[in-house]
Image: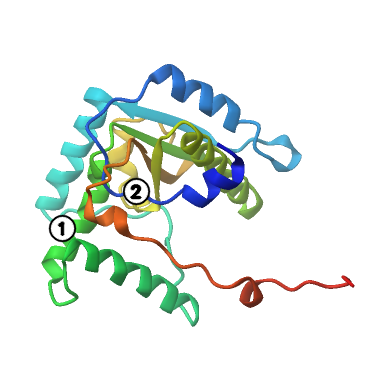
């Protein structure tokens, strides 16, 4: 698979098959992703990969806390407050498309909350991954972590695997720490589901629309 093919086929999968992922394969792909660009070679990403009993325990713990109405202080705001246009419309549109595929109307607030909680079941994926970094790291290092994540996601596609990056996990930092060794002086940046996409899952019919290049890019000095 070419890089262009991996990039074109990568998507946030929200429905996985009950099929294991080989640990040796994941280790190899992570080692390759570690070649991602890093300013000053800081390599600010710290990674934890979780499966089996620890994964089941984490999912059960979060589900129990959600059922009891518990919340935790989030590590950061995933989206800026009061998003202006065109960002607000982009976010709204992808949500409406996804909920349309899974048949949950806007009026079904409880249904939408239940679906959002599926984040914390890793959408049925057999593997969860967390990325964390020291709290003193700044925006350039957060960008490095994003590049690392994209590198891994493309490598996963090359192997026929899929993923879903989930910053929603930043809402449960202390519960995650009960199952994953993330120091308190680190910030939990994101989680990610990894596995084999379920082609029959309705949510996986979602295809986000990207803004045209003319809207986002300016070319200067070309004849």
Category of crowding for the residue at label 2, using alpha-carbon neighbours closer than 10 angstroms: few (below 14), some (14–19), many (at least 20)? many
Determine the residue positioned at 63% across, 71% down.
213
Outermost residue on the bottom side: it is: 85
- Residue 223, percent from left and from top: 90, 72
**Which secondary structure, mark 2?**
loop
Check if mark 1's residue and mark 2's residue have beta carbons within 8 Å.
no
Q: Earlier in the sequence, mark 1 or mark 2?
A: 2
C-alpha separation, residue under disc 1 versus residue under disc 2: 17 Å
- Residue 147, percent from left and from top: 60, 45
**Residue corresponding to mark 2:** 13
Q: Is residue 189 left or right of residue 215?
A: left
Can see residue 134? no
Category of crowding for the residue at label 1, using alpha-carbon neighbours closer than 10 angstroms: few (below 14), some (14–19), many (at least 20)? few
Q: Is residue 22 left or right of residue 136?
A: left
In what quadrant of the picture does the N terminus appear?
Answer: top right
Q: Is residue 111 left or right of residue 82?
A: left
Q: Which mark is residue 114?
A: 1
Task: Say above or below: 73 vs 176.
Answer: below
Quarter of the figure with residue 18: top left
Q: How is the image coloured?
A: rainbow
Determine the residue positioned at 13% across, 56% down.
69
Q: Which mark is residue 157?
A: none
- Residue 25, percent from left and from top: 45, 21
Task: Say above or below: 105 vs 29.
Answer: below
């Amino acid at each position: 698979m070419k890089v262009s093919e991996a990039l074109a086929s990568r998507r946030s999968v929200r429905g996985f098959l009950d099929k294991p992922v080989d640990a040796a394969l994941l280790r190899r792909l992570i080692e390759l992703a570690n070649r991602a660009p890093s300013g000053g070679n800081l390599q600010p990403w710290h990674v934890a990969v979780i499966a089996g009993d620890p994964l089941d325990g984490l999912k059960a713990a979060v589900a129990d806390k959600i059922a009891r109405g518990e919340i935790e202080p989030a590590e950061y705001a995933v989206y800026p407050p009061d998003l202006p246009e065109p960002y607000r419309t982009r976010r709204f549109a992808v949500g409406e498309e996804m909920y349309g595929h899974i048949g949950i109307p806007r009026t079904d607030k409880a249904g939408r909350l239940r679906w959002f909680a599926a984040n914390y079941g890793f959408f049925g994926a057999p593997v969860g991954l967390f990325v964390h970094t020291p709290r003193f790291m700044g925006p350039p290092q957060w960008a490095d972590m994003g590049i690392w994540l994209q590198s891994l996601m493309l490598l996963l596609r090359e192997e026929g695997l899929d993923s879903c990056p989930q910053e929603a996990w930043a809402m449960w930092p202390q519960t995650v720490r009960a199952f994953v060794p993330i120091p308190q002086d680190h910030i939990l940046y994101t989680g990610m589901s990894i596995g084999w996409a379920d082609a029959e899952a309705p949510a996986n019919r979602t295809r986000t629309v990207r803004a045209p290049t003319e809207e986002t890019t300016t070319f200067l000095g070309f004849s």
